[in-house]
Image (cartoon, rainbow, N blue to C red):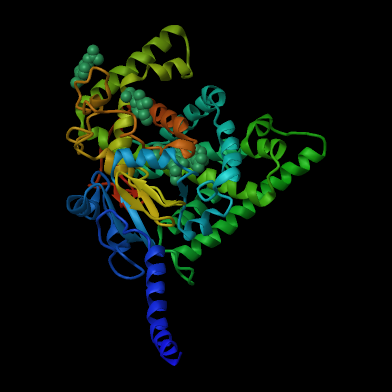
Amino acid sequence: MSDSYLTLSFLSPILALILILLLFKRNQKPKLNLPPGKMGWPLVGETIGYLKPYSATTIGDYMEHHIARYGKIFKSSLFGGPAIVSADAGFNRFIFQNEGKLFECSYPRSIAGILGKWSMLVLVGDMHRDMRTISLNFMSNLRLRTSMLKDVEKHTLLVLRSWKENTKFSAQEEAKKFTFNFMAKHIMSMEPEDAETEELKKEYVTFMKGVVSAPLNLPGTAYRRALQSRATILKFIEGKMEGRVQNIKEGNKIERLEEDEDLLNWVLKNSKLTTEQILDLILSLLFAGHETSSVAIALAIYFLPACPPAMQQLREEHTEIARRKKQAGEVELTWDDYKRMEFTHCVVNETLRLGNVVRFLHRKAIKDIQYKGYDIPCGWKVLPVLAAVHLDPSHFDHPQLFHPWRWQNNGSGGRMPNANNYNFMPFGGGTRLCAGSELAKLEMAVFIHHLILNFQWDLAEKDQPFVYPFVDFPKGLPITVQRHF
Ligand code: HEM
Ligand SMILES: *[C@@H]1O[C@H](CO)[C@@H](O)[C@H](O)[C@H]1NC(C)=O
Ligand SMILES: *[C@@H]1O[C@H](CO)[C@@H](O)[C@H](O)[C@H]1NC(C)=O
């Protein structure tokens, strides 16, 4: 009795240990096959290397080294957590196709702090879908072909007519003037000459500096100033809104007809959004709609003079369009004219491919995911790097070369034979594809049309686009111009 008791009491801890070990073993996940890569320092990880500024027509040292060492899909630690970085066209497409199912949009908290928690970049799920529907309605094909085309041309001419010969000025600023004036007009019926439009434009400059800065909410930082700018911009939009609400209440006496057509009125009349939601929507549409396409236009102004044959071919294309219009007695550009700008469309694509206005996107895995044998744990950040695909020699021959002809159908230009529509995704993809992509391309083409017909331009100082990670010209791209006649 005491013997067996002794044995038992001696054995039981061993049994318990075995049991615990067995349970532990069962609970332990099978070994994950994570993509190769290194996690870097605690907390900061490799973020500093990843964000180090570099020339916009390259993928930068960080991507260069990591792809050479680990391949096109690798792990790292970025923006405060473990991350999978993808320079792989197929994986990027997989990410877009599975938005909301396996992946979810996930921008750093600092972006939400500035753009607002109701901004489309931040929202996911049903709320994102509702906001997206509003934006797509606002930029419908019908509106694009009628009022937007007309105003894109009007605002282009307004900017170009103010240019003086033989004086140096910033092409980047002029492009921004154009895209901002256009958006402010279509969103809130603001006029380019008005003082309030200029004020708002100034606030957006401070605002933008905060978006690109380190998110330190301390006195004197760019981020703090941007938060103050955000408050000022919101107050401004709210002021406009109150005026409209008053108008609608007092029986629809709209002073200016176009107000009935702008986004603010549309949202007030046709949606059930709260004031806070409308404010964030308008603030971020105004932001997304002018900071991106203005950079794209500046990039075209930068790339073209270095490629005289493209300049020549553009000039022929637009002179021919202008000639036909004159013959037909037309003044304003029509949608057919736009469709006829075939080579220009190649220039637009090539500018977006080589310049990469939006370098990479922020996603996270919302499930444990397997892709091509790799495990991607739930909760990890996933960063599709669009630029790395566009500058990949296995997708585009001599990717560093500005060569618009590669987009021509006759195939002589050097887009690789395996070209397909997922190795070119300047506007993202899937259910979050840029809502303004058609508008952006229209703005670029119409601006190029009048630019090339009226001016010859030269870069007045050496300047080149850098990734901060937003693409920007350090000197603002100074140019001088000469009129053609
Ligand atoms: C060349 C110019 C532009 C580029 C390269 C660009 C690029 C992008 C990209 C890559 C996204 C996807 C972001 C993500 O998935 O996380 C996006 C989203 C968006 N863009 Fe653009 N964009 C441009 C111009 C515009 C313009 C002119 C507008 C006009 C309002 C606009 C409005 C939007 C909106 C509303 C979204 C959010 C769409 C959604 O979440 O459903 N963009 N853009
Ligand atoms: C430009 O790229 C888009 C894909 O974003 C494609 O659908 C279009 O055909 C391209 N245009 C030209 C002229 O190749
Ligand atoms: C084919 O591409 C070349 C440029 O590489 C261009 O000069 C030529 O006009 C194109 N031909 C046709 C039929 O589009």
Q: Residue at x 44, y 15 (%)?
A: 336
Tell me if 265 is positioned left or right of 473 in this view: right
Please tell me how many numbered marks the rendered image carries: 0
Q: Can see residue 344?
A: no
The residue closer to the viewer here, 430 or 312, is 430
Image quarter for residue 50? bottom left
Q: Nearer the viewer, residue 308 or 32?
A: 32
Q: Position of residue 307 (x, y in %)?
A: 21, 31
Q: Nearer the viewer, residue 134 or 476?
A: 134
Residue extending farthest bottom:
2
Image quarter for ligand 2: top left
Task: Report whether 429 appears left or right of 32.
Answer: right
Determine which quarter of the picture holds residue 319: top left
Q: Position of residue 309 (x, y in %)?
A: 20, 25
Relative placement, left or right, of 299 versus 276 is left
Residue that appears at 48% across and 29% down = 152
Q: Residue furthest right?
A: 250
User: In which quadrant will I find the C terminus?
Assistant: top left
